[in-house]
Image: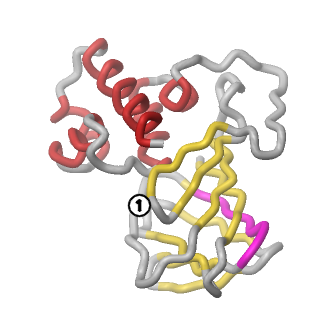
Amino acid sequence: MQEKIIEIANRIKELREVSDIAPEEIASVMDISVDTYLKYENAEADIPASMLLEIANFFKVDMSLLLTGESPRMNVFTVTRDGKGVSVERRSQYKYQALAEKFIGKKVEPFVVTAEPKDGEPTLHSHPGQEFNYILEGSLKIYIHSNEVILNPGDSIYFDSNYPHAMKALDGKPAKFLAIIL
């Protein structure tokens, strides 16, 4: 998986260099420190999927280009078979599987996310836009804007992702959910 992270980081760096944009400029637009941005670009820190989406939007490319190195080609429909989505393991507590990486001009990024059980409180993060999560398996605690909400299979939450948020699998078991980031 480290090899995939390095490939994504290299694609981001290449896009920035080809676009003749300084690291300071993109860091400012992403509202992160230059040091954090450079850690992402050098594969020294995990890049949250939401940040990948922001970077793709900044460069006006499809997120699939960052994930796979290929531009999407489908414009009527695309099918992703069970377990065959592009895997992105950005943080040790979450495993993302992109579900529509081959579709051109997506308005949302759908993922199946597996949250692994971890001790302690998760790290809160935020990103522009909105997010929808639908629980498929297990139980998940969502931390959002000073609230804690427990969701079980069939439950869902839609929220403004500008507010700091995090997810935590409960009962010592992984939780699997559909995440749609827009």
| Closest to the observer, 85 or 16 | 85
User: What residue is at 61 percent from the left and 83 percent from the top?
Assistant: 172
| Closest to the observer, 118 or 161 | 118
| Closest to the observer, 121 or 146 | 121
Q: Amino acid at mark 1?
A: Ser
Identify residue for label 1.
126
- Against 56, residue 127 (above or below) is below
The x and y percentages for residue 88 are: 54, 44
Q: Is residue 100 magenta?
A: no
Describe residue 154's horizontal placement relative to residue 101 as left or right.
right
Describe residue 171's horizontal placement relative to residue 92 as left or right.
right
User: What residue is at 83 percent from the left and 21 percent from the top?
Assistant: 76
- Against 15, residue 156 (above or below) is below
- Against 48, residue 108 (above or below) is above
Q: Which residues are magenta?
A: 131-138
- Against 135, residue 35 (above or below) is above
